[in-house]
């Protein structure tokens, strides 16, 4: 009887101690079936989720805000050297920034790729790049015969006789120093000289706002692309926060006024127009006054296309410029000559006549994507010593590129593997 009573007391004391330890957390909770399976397989135990974990956002930035600054991620482990010796494979690039471009980073690289696509015809087997590449392919040295062939390619690519002579003189100059026996040296010399030629001193690239409003007059022959260029320029300027007024100065062609009106609606610019056959100078005058009234930054003025050989039409162009100055001292601040690149050497003749008649500040070369003879840029820049300001490489508004000499030569003559 006594033994039975002692045994009962021992059981009661044991249960009492067990429940007390469970209540104070000294005993671990029972494992779930999943945990038991993980333990049996040797897998690490999962950390129990807490309310804070469940409520925490999943994005890294938000998680850092709630929990404080996070530790930097560990470096990627390098791939071990193969046991057979030799160079080890390149480490993985995940998490590493792209290598910087020599011309201004990723954006510059993207711009050059866009230029290269636009110049695809010039870079084809029929274009200046493709034909030069064929000449250099497989050559171990350059001699007088190959130099003559280079000259033929340049002339056939609308580089022009004067500019070609300068390029060939450079080739021969370095050849006399025995530095151009290497085809790679020849190519580098040609590219360097081409960049020097198109790097005309003066304003390049974007429109410089010299006054408010800055008045930009676009001139050129029929079909060069003046109206479309105005629409593309307006798109660029408006996207950069500059307010534009468009002047429909081509009063002789109703389609031009309508086309400019469509661009104005698309971009959100006010368009000033006159009646059919109205004096184009008066339209430009009114557009400048409207721009002053509404606080616009730029006036982009269209003009009627005119043959460069017609002296009376060229005189009318001078009159428009004088009328603009009456509306605003110093206007027009820019006179851009729009040239169709597909016209080749005829484009150069046009440019000479316009330069003689007007104080041009730059060239806009359109439809460059439509010709394999991209060398016309070199000929115009060298002969006229006028900066190329923009090049058109397609129909879309963003296909009008600000001209950067180094980028253009890289896109035209760059010998990347992707070419």
Image: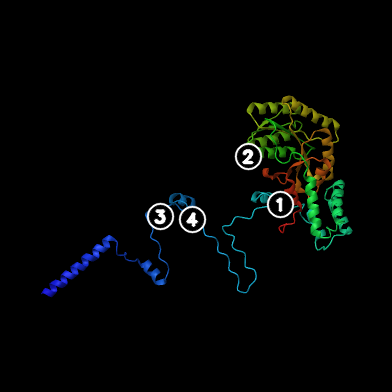
> Which residue appears at 24% of the width and 62% of the height?
20
Is residue 374 among the parts visible in the rendering?
Answer: no
Q: Do callouts 2 and 1 mark residues in contact (Cβ within 8 Å)?
A: no
Judge whether 257 appears above or below 13 on screen.
above
- In which quadrant of the rendered view does residue 181 lie? bottom right
User: Dot 3, how many residues are within 10 Å of its Cα: few (below 14), some (14-19), or many (20+)?
Assistant: few
Q: Which residue is mark 4?
A: 71
Work out whether mark 2 precedes mark 1 in sequence or the reverse, and give the earlier one.
1
User: Dot 4, how many residues are within 10 Å of its Cα: few (below 14), some (14-19), or many (20+)?
Assistant: few
Residue 117, image x and y in percent? Answer: 71, 51
Q: Which residue is mark 2?
A: 239
Residue 385, image x and y in percent? Answer: 81, 41
Q: What sort of colour scheme is used for the picture?
A: rainbow
Q: How many marks?
A: 4
Judge whether 213 appears above or below 406 on screen.
above
Residue 377, image x and y in percent? Answer: 79, 46
State the CA–CA distance, disc 1 to disc 3.
Answer: 50 Å
Q: Do callouts 4 and 1 mark residues in contact (Cβ within 8 Å)?
A: no
Rendered-image quadrant of the C terminus? bottom right
> Which residue appears at 80% of the width and 43% of the height?
381
Q: Which residue is mark 1?
A: 117
Work out whether mark 2 precedes mark 4 in sequence or the reverse, and give the earlier one.
4
State the CA–CA distance, disc 2 to disc 1.
Answer: 23 Å
Q: Which secondary structure lies at badge 2?
A: helix
- In which quadrant of the rendered view does residue 172 lie? bottom right
State the CA–CA distance, disc 2 to disc 4.
Answer: 40 Å
Q: Looking at the image, is mark 2 or mark 4 nearer the viewer?
A: 4
Q: Looking at the image, is mark 4 or mark 3 nearer the viewer?
A: 4
Q: Do callouts 2 and 4 mark residues in contact (Cβ within 8 Å)?
A: no
Q: Which residue is mark 3?
A: 53
- Closer to the camera, 254 or 351? 351
């Amino acid at each position: 009887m006594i033994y039975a009573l002692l045994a009962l007391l021992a059981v009661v004391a044991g249960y009492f101690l067990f429940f007390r330890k469970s209540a104070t957390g000294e005993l671990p909770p029972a494992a779930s079936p999943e945990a038991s399976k993980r333990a049996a397989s040797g897998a690490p135990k999962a950390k129990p989720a807490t309310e804070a974990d469940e409520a925490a956002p999943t994005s890294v930035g938000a998680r850092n805000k709630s929990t404080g600054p996070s530790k930097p991620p560990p470096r990627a482990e390098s791939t071990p050297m193969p046991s057979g010796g030799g160079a080890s494979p390149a480490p993985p690039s995940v998490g590493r920034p792209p290598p910087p471009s020599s011309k201004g980073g990723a954006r510059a690289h993207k711009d050059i790729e866009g230029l290269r696509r636009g110049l695809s015809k010039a870079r084809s087997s029929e274009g200046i790049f493709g034909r030069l590449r064929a000449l250099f392919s497989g050559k171990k040295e350059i001699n007088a015969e190959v130099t003559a062939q280079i000259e033929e390619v340049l002339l056939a690519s609308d580089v022009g006789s004067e500019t070609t002579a300068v390029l060939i003189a450079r080739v021969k100059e370095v050849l006399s120093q025995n530095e151009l026996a290497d085809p790679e040296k020849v190519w580098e010399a040609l590219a360097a000289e081409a960049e020097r030629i198109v790097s005309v001193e003066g304003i390049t690239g974007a429109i410089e706002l010299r006054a408010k409003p800055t008045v930009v007059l676009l001139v050129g022959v029929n079909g060069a692309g003046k109206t479309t260029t105005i629409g593309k320029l307006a798109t660029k300027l408006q996207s950069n926060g500059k307010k534009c007024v468009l002047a429909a100065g081509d009063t002789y062609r109703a389609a031009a006024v309508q086309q400019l009106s469509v661009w104005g609606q698309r971009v959100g610019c006010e368009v000033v127009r006159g009646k059919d056959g109205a004096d184009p100078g008066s339209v430009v005058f009114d557009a400048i006054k409207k721009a002053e009234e509404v606080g616009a930054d730029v006036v982009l003025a269209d003009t009627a296309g005119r043959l460069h050989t017609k002296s009376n039409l060229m005189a009318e162009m001078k009159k428009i410029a004088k009328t603009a100055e009456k509306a605003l001292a110093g206007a027009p601040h820019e006179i851009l000559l729009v040239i169709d690149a597909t016209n080749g050497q005829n484009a150069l003749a046009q440019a000479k006549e316009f330069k003689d008649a007007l104080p041009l500040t730059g060239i806009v070369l359109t439809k460059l994507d439509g010709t394999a003879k991209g060398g016309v840029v070199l000929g115009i820049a060298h002969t006229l010593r006028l900066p190329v300001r923009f090049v058109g490489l397609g129909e879309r508004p963003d296909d009008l590129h600000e001209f950067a000499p180094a980028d253009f030569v890289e896109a035209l003559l760059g010998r990347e593997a992707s070419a």
